[in-house]
């Protein structure tokens, strides 16, 4: 079996940050969080030659690909990273959200703000309908089923009339003005802020869930599904929830995307999107939300920053997945928990 | 006669052509340590797998507190009061010891996923309950100082103890232990024996699979012997020890021509 | 929906179903063989096939075919096609072995979890598709007509053409060769041993690494030669040709019980026929939806396949 840990001595940035974080007071934490949030909201104004992207406009890069990658990677991480279930059809939820907004807006004039929620709802429903049968299957079978699902949604969009067929749908409404902020096509900043707000909500919900019973259930499923079941974990229920919640995130982002680009075609929702998001999760560190967010941001950023990557980004993503799995399967920020040791007699935490 | 908490009647389990269990009758009564022994491949672990709903029996009845659990989902059987450990330790390696036990304790909680997300008062109470329960059990098993360590990094003996703590967290009616002393030295075996008695005295009935005879003889109230999927003897430790069929089975001279 | 076509065109649908099934069979064997030894779906297998189609095309281009020539005589055709199929087989076979080394071997040695291996293979697959997208310029590539496709003779409504005969004869010959290899050679027996029980076969002195490499080689060669037949029959390829064909071939393998060689063959023909008949009624653009639904239904209700032996749950 495994040997006792002796890793505590190694210097490690994550542990350093953790130590510092645990030493802070409540007020300091609030302040720190506020500062981080403010930083991200004013980020579009910090465009400069060093940070900025030369391949395209910085604030539009912040919206797509960076922001979209980050939030979708966080959504996918619930199922792939936390519960260890490989979902290769994540793009389907994204597509469902986008088409929900497009169809309901064009045919019935539903406004964006309603469609975001409906898009989430339909994505969740689709997740439920696919997950109910598919989540009973073993890992690689499930992977191929979800892969097929993502592709089928796209093929259906091509074959049906109400989705506009291969030509797609155009003239989709942007979100109406909110708090005096106008959503117009040539200014991506408001869309970035919208995405950021959504992201904060998702992170809030995620952190609460994983710190409590659902988080333990998901991890237990990832570690050993059979044993989780023996320990009274309703594995199917939690897998479904993970699937559906990830789907909800994808659906909401899809609606935002449709509202920004205002025209969509089935070719916006290819398998490659699913795999790129998966690459973000894998690169950042499966199961660690901060790693995943950082990984997705980097993978969104560098192809826009570096000329030689922008044409070959997918090639690079594929290579990265193979390389990461071979040399650093835990990603750039591993999910490994910080270990604490308690004294046998006093029950006090022993400082390292 | 005290109440039978787990009762297995005429249980048969076939895997393709292999008959792992054939017409086995067993029971575990309130407040006792029952032992299940037998040579390798006798079908002992299979009894656990069938009782916990992992396999559906080919034939037979399984009653947990007088309620049939055949066909009931594994996690539901676990919640009804049947918790187990594994012959080869199977912990949630990347979770801390405390979280391992809390996962077991969670199964007694009511809070759902949305409740956890919105932080309802039930969710807070439940979270506290799981935490307290887990801390108590780690203490009970003498591994409090491991609470914050990842299960995979614990020394082997503590892993075994942690597995028992995790199972106890389900507050089972019957605790199923699959060779808990495997790999222990004599000193550790004695300590484990005392611990199992302590578990019984705390109100859990125990069904123990064990190869170490001296441990079985010392702590169990009743012993059943399996050989080639059939129960060949049952009785107090001293009765079983003298049984010729049992001696033959262990020496491997019994005639299994049929 | 017009069901009468099922009767009026019965013979031609049947023939095409069998021809398509024969191509699927060669690809699905790769899935099933690798699954047998690794217990993993080789996600990049479809790209091994795709690579073969371009190798086939490359040979004809190097020989100077432009697509405007008259079809060849039978001997000239056989010469050209054998060369192309051999090159495709070698190219795909070596690519598959390389894939095993790069994407699987180290993970296997480190006892990595299944998820890692799947992700690694998916990454490799993405890389290959994109690589070929770039070098082939995202274009559709036509394959020159090597054989006269006028009907040789007619059976009912089915027009029997030379290319269909070549595909059928060639595929059956390959299947027989494969069967001989698996049944009689040392490495073939190794494949069977590892498929049955890896641990025991190690104890019995089977060199598992070599067996696995050999399995990838065979699967790759079959997919490569299959891709030559594919090119002969469909006469076009594209960088993403592997994806849907891979799903079909994989579905065929599952239909026959994944890991089961003869099952994969049977599953391929069954799927080829189902696809032809259903497309005749629903339209060709629903073919892949139908395939996917079959895949889901089989996995859900009969995951051991139509002919698979009853697999047990993992032991605890
Ligand atoms: N899933 C299964 N599929 C096929 N055969 C099985 C399965 N599970 C158990 N068996 C067979 O049933 C028989 C009993 O196995 P079991 O594991 O219950 O024995 P055991 O008494 O626990 O032995 P040990 O002391 O070695 O743990 C063995 O012959 C075993 O091979
Ligand atoms: Mg056993």
Image (cartoon, coloured by chain):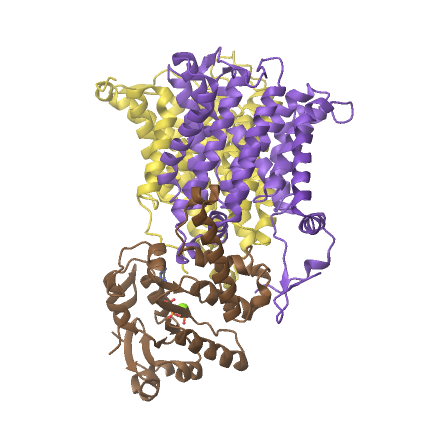
Chain colours: A purple, B brown, C yellow
Q: Where is residue C192 in the image (x, y as percent from the top left)?
A: 44, 53
At a point 42% along the width and 47% down the height, the residue shown is: C180
Q: Can I make out residue B184 in this image?
A: yes
> Is residue C92 shown left or right of residue C244?
right
At a point 75% along the width and 27% down the height, the residue shown is: A51
Ligand 2 in which quarter: bottom left
> Is residue C261 shown left or right of residue A259?
left
Image mark count: 0
- Residue projecting furthest to the right: A49
> Which quadrant would the N terminus of chain A be assigned to in this image?
bottom right
- A253 is higher (above) or lower (below) than B235: above
Q: Where is residue A29 in the image (x, y as percent from the top left)?
A: 66, 43
At a point 26% along the width and 69% down the height, the residue shown is: B7
- B254 is higher (above) or lower (below) than A97: below
Q: Where is residue A143 in the image (x, y as percent from the top left)?
A: 46, 39
Q: Camera-side residue: A28 or C147? A: A28
Q: Camera-side residue: B191 or A3? A: B191
> Which quadrant would the C terminus of chain A be assigned to in this image?
bottom right
> Is residue A10 shown left or right of residue B27?
right
The answer to which image quadrant residue A299 occupies is top right
Q: Position of residue B117 (x, y in %)?
A: 48, 42
- A152 is higher (above) or lower (below) than B99: above
> Is residue B36 shown left or right of residue A81?
left
Q: Camera-side residue: B7 or B21? A: B7
């Amino acid at each position: 079996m495994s040997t006792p840990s002796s890793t505590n001595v190694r210097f490690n940035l994550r542990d350093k940050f953790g130590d510092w974080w645990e030493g802070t007071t409540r007020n300091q934490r609030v302040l720190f969080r506020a500062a981080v949030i403010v930083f991200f909201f004013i980020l579009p104004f910090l465009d400069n030659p060093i940070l900025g992207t030369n391949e395209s406009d910085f604030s539009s890069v912040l919206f797509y690909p960076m922001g979209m990658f980050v939030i979708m990677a966080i959504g996918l991480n619930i199922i792939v990273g936390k519960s260890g279930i490989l979902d290769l059809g994540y793009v389907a939820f994204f597509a469902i959200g986008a088409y929900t907004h497009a169809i309901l807006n064009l045919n019935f004039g539903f406004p964006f703000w309603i469609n975001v929620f409906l898009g989430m709802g339909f994505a969740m429903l689709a997740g439920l309908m696919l997950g109910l049968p598919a989540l009973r299957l073993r890992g690689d079978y499930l992977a191929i089923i979800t892969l097929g699902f993502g592709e089928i949604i796209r093929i259906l969009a091509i074959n049906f009339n109400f989705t506009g067929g291969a030509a797609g749908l155009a003239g989709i409404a942007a979100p109406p003005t909110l708090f005096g902020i106008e959503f117009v096509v040539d200014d991506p900043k408001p869309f970035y802020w919208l995405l950021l707000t959504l992201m904060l909500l998702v992170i809030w919900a995620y952190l609460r869930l994983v710190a409590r019973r659902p988080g333990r259930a998901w991890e237990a499923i990832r570690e050993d599904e059979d044993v989780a079941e023996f320990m009274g974990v309703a594995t199917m229920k939690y897998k479904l929830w993970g699937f559906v919640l990830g789907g909800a995130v994808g659906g909401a982002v899809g609606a935002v995307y449709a509202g920004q680009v205002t025209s969509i075609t089935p070719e916006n929702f290819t398998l490659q999107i699913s795999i790129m998001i998966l690459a973000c999760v894998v690169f950042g560190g499966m199961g660690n939300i901060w790693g995943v967010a950082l990984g997705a941001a980097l993978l969104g950023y560098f192809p826009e920053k570096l000329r030689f990557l922008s044409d070959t980004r997918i090639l690079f993503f594929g290579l990265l997945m193979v390389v990461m799995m071979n040399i650093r399967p835990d990603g750039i920020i591993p999910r490994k928990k910080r270990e604490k040791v308690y004294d046998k007699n006093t029950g006090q935490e022993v400082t390292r | 006669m005290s109440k039978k908490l787990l009762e297995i009647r005429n249980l048969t389990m076939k895997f393709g052509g292999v008959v792992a269990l054939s017409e086995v009758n067993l029971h575990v009564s309130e407040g006792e340590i029952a032992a299940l022994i037998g040579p390798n491949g006798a079908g002992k672990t299979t009894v656990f797998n069938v009782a916990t709903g992992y396999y559906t029996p080919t034939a037979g009845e399984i009653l947990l507190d007088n309620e049939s659990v055949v066909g009931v989902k594994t996690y539901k059987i676990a919640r009804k009061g049947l918790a187990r450990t594994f012959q080869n330790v199977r912990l949630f390696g990347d979770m801390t010891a405390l979280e391992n036990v809390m996962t077991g304790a969670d199964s007694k909680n009511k809070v759902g996923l949305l409740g956890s997300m919105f932080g309802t008062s039930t969710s807070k109470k439940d979270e506290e309950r799981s935490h307290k329960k887990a801390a108590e059990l780690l203490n009970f098993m003498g591994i409090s100082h491991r609470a914050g360590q990842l299960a995979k990094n614990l020394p082997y003996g503590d892993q075994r103890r942690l597995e028992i703590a995790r199972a106890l967290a389900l507050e089972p009616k019957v605790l199923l232990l699959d060779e808990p002393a495997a790999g222990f030295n004599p000193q550790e075996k004695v300590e484990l024996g005392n611990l199992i008695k302590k578990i019984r005295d705390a109100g859990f009935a125990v069904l123990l699979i064990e190869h170490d005879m001296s441990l079985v003889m010392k702590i169990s109230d009743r012993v059943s012997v399996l050989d080639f999927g059939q129960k060949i003897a049952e009785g107090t430790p001293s009765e079983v020890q003298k049984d010729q069929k049992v001696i033959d089975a262990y020496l491997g001279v019994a005639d299994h021509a049929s | 929906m017009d069901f009468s076509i099922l009767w009026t065109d019965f013979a031609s649908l049947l023939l095409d179903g069998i021809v398509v099934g024969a191509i699927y069979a060669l690809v699905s064997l790769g899935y099933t063989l690798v699954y047998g030894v690794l217990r993993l779906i080789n996600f990049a297998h479809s790209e091994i096939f795709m690579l073969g189609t371009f190798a086939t095309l490359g040979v004809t281009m190097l020989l100077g075919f432009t697509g405007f020539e008259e079809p060849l005589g039978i001997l000239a055709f056989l010469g050209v096609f054998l060369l192309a199929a051999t090159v495709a087989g070698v190219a795909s076979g070596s690519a598959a072995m390389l894939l095993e080394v790069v994407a699987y071997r180290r993970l296997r040695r480190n006892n990595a979890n299944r998820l890692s291996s799947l992700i690694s293979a998916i990454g490799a697959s993405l890389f290959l598709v994109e690589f070929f997208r770039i070098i082939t310029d995202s274009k559709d590539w036509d394959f020159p007509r090597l054989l006269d496709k006028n009907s040789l003779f007619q059976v009912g409504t089915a027009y029997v053409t030379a290319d269909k005969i070549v595909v059928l004869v060639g595929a059956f010959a390959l299947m027989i060769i494969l069967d001989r290899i698996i049944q009689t050679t040392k490495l073939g027996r190794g494949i069977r041993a590892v498929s049955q029980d890896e641990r025991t076969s190690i104890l019995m002195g089977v060199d598992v690494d070599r067996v696995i490499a050999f399995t990838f080689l065979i699967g790759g060669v079959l997919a490569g030669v299959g891709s030559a037949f594919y090119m002969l029959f469909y006469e076009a390829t594209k960088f993403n040709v592997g994806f849907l064909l891979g799903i079909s071939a994989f579905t065929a393998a599952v239909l026959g019980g994944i890991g089961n060689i003869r099952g994969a063959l049977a599953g391929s023909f069954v799927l080829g026929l189902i696809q032809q008949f259903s497309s005749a009624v629903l339209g060709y653009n629903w073919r892949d939806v139908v395939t996917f639904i079959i895949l889901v239904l089989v996995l859900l209700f009969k995951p051991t396949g139509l002919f698979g032996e009853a697999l047990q749950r993992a032991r605890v």
